[in-house]
Image (cartoon, rainbow, N blue to C red):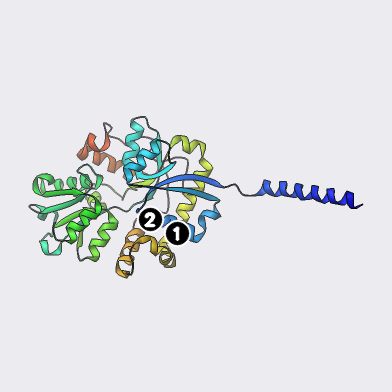
Amino acid sequence: MRSFVRPLLAGLAIASAVVLSGFSPETHKLTLGLQGTGTAKWELAAMTALGIDKKHQLELDVRDLADSKAGQIALQAGEVEVILSDFVWVSLQRHQGNMVTMVPHSLTVGGLIVDPAAGIATIADLKGKTLAVSGSAVDKSFVILSAYYAKQTGSKLLDDVDAKFGAPPLINELITGDKAQAALNLWNWNARAKIAGKTELISVPAMLADLGVSETPPLLGWVFSDDTANQKKVELKAFLDSSFETKAALMTDDAVWDTIRPAMNVGDDDALFKQLRDDYRAGIVLKYSASDMGPAEQSFALMAKFGGPDVVGDATDLADGTFWKGYHK
C-alpha cells in the first residue's frame, strides 16, 4: 500500500506544481536608460517604495547614462529599450526614418530666472545683461525665449545680451554667484536658484502662451522604438501604467515625498525639498491621448520657424506617430 501511495503523492505534488506555475504572474521586463542624477529617478524610487512595480509584475533593468545624448545613442544602438527624450527629437528621428515614438512624462520646463538686484522688470531689460543659458543656442527653451524676446522687442536676443552657455550646474553657479544677471536653466536647477534668492521673471509655458501655444506641451516623454512597441506592448503597458499610477501618488501624497527624499540630494534643506516637490508636481502628467497633442504640434511649428533646421531638421510639421497611438490614459 505504501509503495502505491508514495508515488501517487509525488505525482500529485508534481501536477500541483505544474498547475500553479501555469497561473503564476508573468514578469514584464524592460531595460530603461536614465541619467544617473536625473529627476526621473525620483519617480522610480517612489514606484519601488509603493510596490507599484510589483503590483504590475514589472521588472526594470535601469542603466545609468551620462546625459540625454547618451540615452539617444543607447536607444539607437539597442542597448536600452526606453529612455527619456523630447518630442522634437522623436519627430526629427521619424522624419529621418528612425522610427521611435513616445508617451508623455512631464510638462515641467524651465523659466527665465533673474537677480532681483539687476533691475530686470521686463524681458526688454535683458538688453546689455549677461544671460547664462543651459545647453546651447539650439536648445528648445532658448529658441522659445529668443522668439518671445523678438516678439516683445523686435530685436534678436543674441545681439542684445552677453550669452554664456554651459551645463546646468555651471549656469546655476553663474546666476547664484552674481556672475550673470539672468539665467535660463532646467527647472530643478531653477528651484535651487529661487532658494538662493533669485526670482522667476517668466516661465517657458508663459512665453509659449504669449506666442500662441494654447497649453503647455509635454516636452519630455518615455521614448522607445516602434519595434519595441510592437514586440513588447504588454511590457510597455505595465511600465506606463506603473508610471502614471506613481505620478498620481506623487501629486497628492506628501508622505511619498518624505520616502524618496534621499534620492533628491537635498540633505537637510527643507526649503529646497519643498521647492523641488512643488515644482515637480506642477509638471506631472496624469492623462494621455495621442489624439490630443495640439500644443505639441503648435510648439513644433514655432520651433521650426524660429530655430530652423538646426532644431527640427528639414521638416516643419510634427511627424505622424511621434506620440504612441498604442496607449492612452
- On the image, the x and y values in percent for residue 211 come to 22, 47
Q: Residue at x 26, y 57 (%)?
A: 189
Residue tagged by mark 2? 284
Residue tagged by mark 1? 46
In front of the other: 298 or 89: 89
Q: Residues within 10 Å of mark 1 (few under 14, many from 20)?
A: many
Q: Quadrant of residue 183?
A: bottom left
- On the image, the x and y values in percent for residue 290 come to 41, 42
- On the image, the x and y values in percent for residue 186 come to 27, 53
User: Label 1's element?
Assistant: helix
Amino acid type of the residue that numbered disc 1 sits on in the rendered structure:
Ala
Residue 321 shows up from this direction: no
Q: Quadrant of residue 123?
A: bottom left
- On the image, the x and y values in percent for residue 274 come to 33, 66
Q: Quadrant of residue 101?
A: top left
Q: Residue at x 84, y 48 (%)?
A: 7
Residue 191 shows up from this direction: yes
Q: Residue at x 80, y 49 (%)?
A: 10
Q: Nearer the viewer, mark 1 or mark 2?
A: 1
Q: Are discs 1 and 2 less than 8 Å apart at CB?
A: no
